[in-house]
Structures are given as C-alpha cells and as structure tokens.
C-alpha cells in the first residue's frame, strides 16, 4: 500500500514547503549580489584601464607635439660674389657664413643690438647657408629670403622648456638675449611654423640639435620591414601549410610544434644575441645595416606568422577539403585552390600584426649596433638602403632619449608619436582586410 501523504522535502511527512519561481530566497539573493559585484569589478577594471590609457596618451601628446613645431628667423639676405669667395677661402667656412648672417640681421635691427646676442639667438645656420649658395651660385647678388631655426635654448624658451629665471647665470642665453628674442617675435622676425624638418630631416650633432629629424630612420625602418616581409611571409606560410596539411602526426612534428610555440615567447633580445653571433660575427654581414636588422626581426616574427597561419588554415571547414577531394582534386590542389584562399584574410592579419610588433622592437637592434650609428644622410641607391649602416625609428628614439639636451627629449616623444602612427596604420589595415575578406561558415 502506497502512502500518498505529502512530504516536506526531507522525507518526513508534514506541511508542503511554500515555494514559487517569483519568490526570491536567500540563495538567489546571494547569487544576484555576486553577479552584481562581478559586473562592478569588470566595469572598474575597464575604467582603470581607460584611465591609464588616457594618461599615457596625454603624456605622449603633451610631450611630443611641441616637436612638430619650430621657431624660425625670417631674414632677407644678399650675398655678393666677393663675400662668397672670401667665405670659401677661410678655414672655418660655416663660421664665415654665420658672421654674414649675424651682421645682416644686426644691421637690419639697428646699431643698439648686440651681435653676440643675435649669435646666441640664432642656431648653427652657417652650414645651411653654405649648402644653399654652393648649390645655387646663380643666386649670388640676389636677395634671398631664409627661414632659419633659432637656437635650441630660444626654442625651448618659447615652448616653455626654459624659464627666464633659469637663465640668470647662464652664459649660453642671458636675460638680455631673451628680451631681444621677445622683441624679434613681436616684430615678426621670429615666427612659429610646422616643423617639416623633423619629419624629413636626418640625425644631427649635439651642436645643432634643432636640425635633427627622424626621416632617415623612417627610411631605415622601411628597408628593414621589406626584408622582414619578403622573408617571413613565404617561409612562415610554407611551414604552416606543411605542418597543418601534409606533415605526419608523430612525435617529431609534435616537438617542432612545441618549439615554435615556445619561440614566440622568447625575449626579443635573445634573437638580437643570435643575430650578432651568426649574421655579423660568423657570416660577416655589415653591422648596423637594415639587412641584418631585417634578418633578426624575421627570426622573431616567424613564430607569430606560423601560429596565426595555422590557426587560419584550421578554421577552414573540413567539408571544403572533402568536397575538393571528392571531385577529383589532389591534396595540393585542394589546399592551394580552396583552403589557402579562404584562409588568406587571417594570414594577412597575422602577418601585419607580426610586422607591427617587429617595427617597434628595440632590443634586437641594440645588439647589432643600430643604436650607436648616426644616420647623417639618406641612402643614395636601393642597395645602399639595405647594406649601408642606417638607423631605425625605435633605435633613433632610444638615442635621443639618452642625450642631455632637453630638445632631444622632446624629439624622442615626437618620434614616439610617429612610430605610434605607423603602428596604428598597420593595425587599421589589418582590421580592414579582416573585415573585407572575412568568411563565415
């Protein structure tokens, strides 16, 4: 005989427990509170990350944007044939041209102006004048308008790096010089303009820091990235296709796959040591050349490209391969005619991200000497661009940050902005390619 009496859940007879889906008990309240706390922690983490990002962006922009402007002296100068010949006959030719510039500006502003103050206000512009007139001797005797950058200290005063009080006991820039610079700015002789020379110029010495630019380093990075792209893309894609589609699944291929994954986590300076030992000391390749830098960064980028390419190939549905094999295609035809085109967006995305990572690497370049080299000119030919010593953007930024003059510190922040623009551009290209060619199954 069956006892049909209702139980209270513990097996003992009694009154049935009152429960409803609309009733919120203590355990449900605890779960809801835990979920609310988890959401709050997530929102707080996002806000904290955004605050760090905003502080970083603000620091970079506030410190680096002044590098994209410069203060120049506008001057109409007439150099005669006799003055040109006299300057070329002297031992210190650039100093002779600077004297011509100082005397012309002093005569324009009046006899009360101290020529030594003008010399301290103007930068080292003698080489600029000499380069212009040696290349344009037909302009001798004509009035030419020059826009020459002021000295680094006067430029720092107008940008707020240097205060008037700090120059009270300085012999490089006196308070009287600052008064004269303010007067020249009010009269329109000193103006502020966009600093194209920073983007197109080359490295400069400590005597003329306002002329330093990052242009040659950008070209060096471009040649280096060409080497990385030409070598890493075909080698990485070929290795990935073999390992994913053709290699037998045994212990040997497992060891290779594990080592590739481990290589992606090796610090970049280890690849720099490898490049120094093999490419420079053993193979005898030129030191500080973009070719060696590109080879070292290729070793560092290959694991990233192989891993991303294998993931892209693995994402293609097996039905694509089966359908191709079913209509009579060979294994190679199914891979190259069907699987590889479908995996191409992911391969391009991984390659661009790998190149962007290589573009910002500094540690490997330290070991092969690209930091110690000063790029004073652009490469003349394509072969010189690959084989001659040059610098790269991360190495140039590192060099500027290590110098004593504050204007180099400003230029280092400006170089960081240029490097970030390149990195953002490459990442945007990767996103656009992925969105454009992405396939969903």
Image (spheres, rainbow, N blue to C red):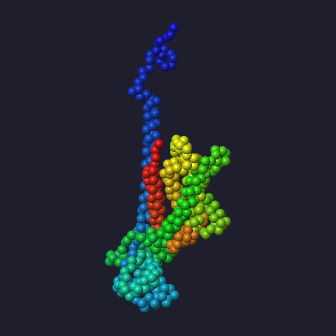
The residue that appears at 43% across and 28% down in the rendered structure is: 25
Q: Is residue 261 left or right of residue 53?
A: right
Residue 224 coordinates in the image, percent (x, y): 54, 64
Q: Position of residue 297 (x, y in %)?
A: 57, 60
**Front-lying residue, 174 or 322:** 322
What residue sits 58% from the left and 53% below the top?
238
Residue at the outermost left position: 187
Q: How many numbered marks have been drawn onto this rendered protein structure?
A: 0
Residue that lies at the very extreme toward the bottom in this rendered image: 82
Residue drawn at point x = 52 percent, y = 61 percent: 359
Q: Quadrant of residue 192?
A: bottom left
Residue 154: in sight, yes or no?
yes
Q: Can you give x and y, in whole percent of width and height, for residue 296 in the image?
A: 59, 61
Relative height, residue 136 to residue 32 (above, below): below
- Which residue lies at the image location 46% right of the left edge and 46% below the top edge? 439
- Whether residue 311 is visible here, answered yes or no, is no
Q: Residue furthest front?
A: 328
Residue 8's spot in the image, x, y percent? 47, 18
Apparent side of residue 377 relative to residue 24 in the rendered image (left or right): right
**Residue closest to the eye, 263 or 343:** 343
| Closer to the camera in the image, 219 or 317 | 317
Residue 28 location, quadrant: top left
The relative height of residue 288 versus residue 8 in the rendered view (above or below) is below
């Amino acid at each position: 005989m069956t006892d049909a009496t209702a139980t209270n859940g513990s097996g003992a007879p009694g009154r049935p427990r009152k429960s409803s889906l609309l009733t919120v008990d203590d355990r449900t309240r605890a779960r809801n509170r835990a979920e609310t706390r988890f959401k709050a922690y997530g929102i707080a983490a996002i806000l904290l990350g955004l605050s760090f990002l905003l502080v970083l962006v603000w620091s970079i922009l506030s410190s680096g944007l002044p590098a994209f402007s410069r203060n120049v002296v506008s001057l109409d100068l007439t150099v005669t044939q006799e003055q040109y010949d006299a300057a070329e006959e002297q031992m210190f030719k650039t100093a002779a041209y600077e004297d011509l510039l100082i005397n012309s500006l002093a005569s324009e502003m009046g006899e009360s102006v101290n020529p030594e103050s003008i010399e301290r206000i103007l930068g080292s512009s003698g080489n600029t004048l000499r380069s212009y007139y040696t290349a344009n001797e037909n302009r001798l005797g004509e009035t030419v308008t020059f826009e020459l950058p002021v000295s680094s200290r006067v430029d720092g005063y107008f940008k707020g790096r240097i205060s008037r009080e700090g120059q009270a006991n300085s012999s490089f820039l006196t308070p009287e010089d600052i008064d004269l610079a303010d007067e020249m700015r009010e009269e329109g002789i000193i103006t502020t303009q966009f600093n194209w020379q920073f983007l197109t110029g080359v490295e400069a010495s400590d005597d003329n820091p306002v002329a330093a630019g990052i242009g040659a380093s950008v070209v060096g990075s471009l040649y280096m990235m060409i080497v990385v792209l030409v070598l890493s893309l075909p080698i990485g894609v070929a290795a990935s296709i073999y390992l994913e589609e053709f290699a037998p699944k045994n212990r040997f291929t497992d060891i290779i796959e594990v080592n590739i994954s481990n290589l992606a986590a090796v610090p970049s300076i280890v690849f720099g040591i490898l490049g120094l030992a093999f490419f420079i000391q053993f193979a005898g390749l030129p030191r500080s050349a973009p070719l060696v830098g590109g080879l070292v960064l290729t070793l560092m980028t290959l694991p990233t490209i192989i891993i991303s390419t294998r993931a892209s190939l693995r994402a293609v549905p097996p039905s694509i391969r089966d359908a191709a094999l079913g209509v009579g295609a060979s294994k190679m035809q199914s891979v190259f005619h069907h699987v590889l085109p479908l995996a191409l967006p992911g391969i391009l995305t991984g390659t661009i991200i790998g190149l962007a990572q290589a573009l910002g690497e500094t540690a490997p370049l330290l070991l092969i000497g690209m930091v110690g080299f000063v790029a004073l000119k652009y490469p003349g030919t394509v072969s010189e661009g690959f084989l001659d010593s040059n610098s790269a953007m991360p190495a140039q930024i590192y060099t500027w940050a290590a110098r004593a003059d504050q204007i180099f510190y400003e230029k280092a922040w400006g170089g960081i902005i240029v490097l970030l623009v390149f990195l953002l551009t490459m990442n945007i290209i990767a996103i656009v390619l992925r969105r454009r060619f992405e396939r969903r199954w």
